[in-house]
């Protein structure tokens, strides 16, 4: 079986267009849910700006998921999905350890950038493994879309750099990450 | 890497096990990944939430029962295992999962581990080992490495840490494994295998404390230093080799199943049921129970 490490059980050699669409929808769903989860954690931990940025990313992933689902329904109707959440692990979803209390928007943008790059690398690897022509077209499209998302995040990062109110690069100096006596 | 035994076709989804309560762990905490792996393992097994009970003690990781839709009891410090044993004996049909931290399990509750192992009830014990007391703001825990400076050991700890893998293996646990949320597919598969093991199953999960943990114990370090047991060609039925590998706890990050008894003995709960069945014909009517103790 030709599966990738973060998608155990998915055989890319045999993947059809419908299965590829199911995989892509699930990847976007996982990313959306993770962004919401991270936004909630940051919101509870008094880090509202980064939290709000992750909510924005969650909306973007949801938009992408709906677009893929619409395409899937148009071609294959309501046939049950062939890919479940048990088969994919953090393909586009940011890793849990990438966030910190009091992280800045710039740091949140860098997390999103890594995630978009991670997703692009995954779809690129999938493209290399897949033999079905239609599925290959879909993966090529997804590689391009993830590149667009990456460009959006890079533009936001550049805007931050020129914004006098933007976050400085690196770790903010106004909090302690060492144990402190209570 | 071990893979989950059930994937496609499972009717349950990880969301079925996730409650509406939002975790309040520090952003970046390892326990988020553990919880996600747990939801996935439960979905792979597919038992409905009302057939599962989570029992925990006190600590950051002991909040897990609240984050699931299963039955849950966030009990008292160090007493998760005795309570879980009671729950399992009262209702053997429940899938009982015990969760807690290294302090809860190997300090105040340390004495209970040996008895839970030797009784061999069908329990799954998940310890989120972060080598520090995180909830109470960074004191020395039983698995803290020697020399660690904390608020309660400002000049560095003088004690050797407890080795949870060696501890449970030495008492004869039938299933002992170690995982990390830095490797989610492997951790999910380990939790699933532990739950499926018919007997006491122990999983030591290296779950970093992002606020009080050391840099070398964070997920980035885990990702860099992972040593999957499968890549070493380890045979999980080899108990002696498992004991040998367990000795490197704190030095090497071995992940995977260290030991799985290939011939699991009957569980304590099964033996109790057997005895209850054997004694049933001579059992006294409940209304006459006091007659056993009162002399006429």
Image (tube, coloured by chain):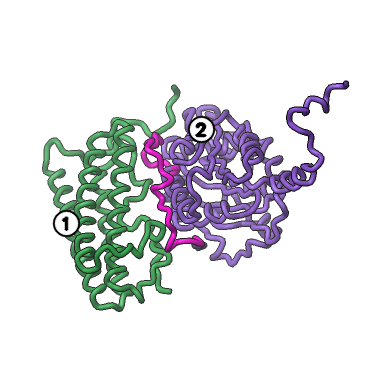
Query: Residue B75 lies in magenta, yes or no?
Result: no
The reply to whether residue B26 is in sight is no
Mark 1 chain: A
B213 shown above or below A29 = above
Question: Relative to residue A42, is residue B269 drawn left or right?
Answer: right
Residue B122: give x, y in percent of width and height: 64, 47
Residue at 56%, 53% in the rendered image: B252
Chain ID for purple: B
Q: Secondary structure at mark 2?
A: loop
Residue A152: give x, y in percent of width and height: 16, 53
**Magenta stretch, overall SS:** loop
**Quadrant of the image occupied by residue A119:** bottom left
B275 shown above or below B7 = above
Q: Nearer the viewer, mark 2 or mark 1?
A: 2
Residue B33: give x, y in percent of width and height: 42, 47
B176 shown above or below B50 = below
Question: Relative to residue A3, is residue B70 drawn left or right?
Answer: right
- Which span is picked out in magenta? B4-31
Tell me the number on the disc at residue A151: 1
The reply to whether residue B19 is in sight is yes
Q: Nearer the viewer, residue B34 or A107?
A: B34
Q: Secondary structure at mark 1?
A: helix
Q: Colour of chain A?
A: green
**Spatial separation of the CA atoms under disc 2 and disc 1:** 42 Å
Mark 2 lies on residue: B59
């Amino acid at each position: 079986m030709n599966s990738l490490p973060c998608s155990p059980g998915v055989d890319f050699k045999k993947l059809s267009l419908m299965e590829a669409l199911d995989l892509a929808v699930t990847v976007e769903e996982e990313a959306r849910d993770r962004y919401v989860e991270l936004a909630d954690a940051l919101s509870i931990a008094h880090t509202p700006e980064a939290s709000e940025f992750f909510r924005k990313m969650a909306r973007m992933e949801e938009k992408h998921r709906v677009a893929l689902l619409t395409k899937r329904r148009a071609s294959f109707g309501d046939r049950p999905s062939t890919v479940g959440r048990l088969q994919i692990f953090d393909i586009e979803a940011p890793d849990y350890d990438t966030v910190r209390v009091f992280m800045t928007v710039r740091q949140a943008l860098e997390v999103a950038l890594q995630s978009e790059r991670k997703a692009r690398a995954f779809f690129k690897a999938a493209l290399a493994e897949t033999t079905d022509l239609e599925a290959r077209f879909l993966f090529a499209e997804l590689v391009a879309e993830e590149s667009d998302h990456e460009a959006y995040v890079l533009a936001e990062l550049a805007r931050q750099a020129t914004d006098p109110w933007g976050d400085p690069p690196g770790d903010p100096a106004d909090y302690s990450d060492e144990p402190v006596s209570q | 890497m071990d893979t989950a035994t059930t994937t496609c076709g499972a009717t349950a989804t990880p969301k079925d096990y996730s409650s509406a309560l939002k975790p309040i762990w520090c952003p970046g905490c390892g326990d988020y990944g553990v919880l996600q792996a747990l939801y996935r393992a439960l979905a792979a097994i597919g038992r409905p939430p009302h057939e599962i009970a989570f029992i925990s003690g006190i600590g950051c990781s002991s909040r897990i029962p609240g984050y699931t839709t299963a039955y849950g009891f966030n009990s008292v410090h160090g007493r998760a295992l005795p309570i879980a044993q009671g729950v399992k004996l009262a209702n053997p049909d429940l899938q009982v999962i015990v969760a807690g931290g290294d302090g809860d399990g190997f300090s105040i509750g340390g004495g209970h581990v040996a008895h839970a192992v030797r009784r061999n009830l069908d329990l799954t014990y998940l310890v989120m080992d972060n080598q520090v007391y995180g909830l109470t703001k960074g004191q020395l825990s039983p698995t803290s490495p020697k020399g660690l400076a904390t608020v309660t050991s400002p000049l560095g700890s003088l004690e050797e840490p407890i080795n949870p893998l060696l501890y449970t293996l030495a008492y004869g646990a039938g299933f002992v494994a170690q995982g990390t949320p830095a490797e989610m597919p492997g951790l999910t598969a380990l939790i699933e295998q532990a739950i499926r093991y018919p007997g006491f199953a122990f999983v030591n999960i290296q779950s970093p404390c992002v606020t009080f943990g050391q840099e070398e114990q964070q997920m980035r370090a885990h990702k860099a230093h992972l040593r999957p047991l499968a890549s070493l060609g380890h045979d999980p039925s080899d108990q002696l080799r498992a004991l040998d590998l367990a000795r490197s706890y704190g030095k090497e990050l071995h992940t995977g199943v260290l030991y799985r008894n290939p011939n699991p003995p009957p569980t304590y709960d099964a033996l109790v049921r057997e005895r209850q069945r054997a004694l049933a014909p001579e059992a006294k009517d409940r209304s006459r129970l006091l007659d056993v103790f009162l002399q006429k």
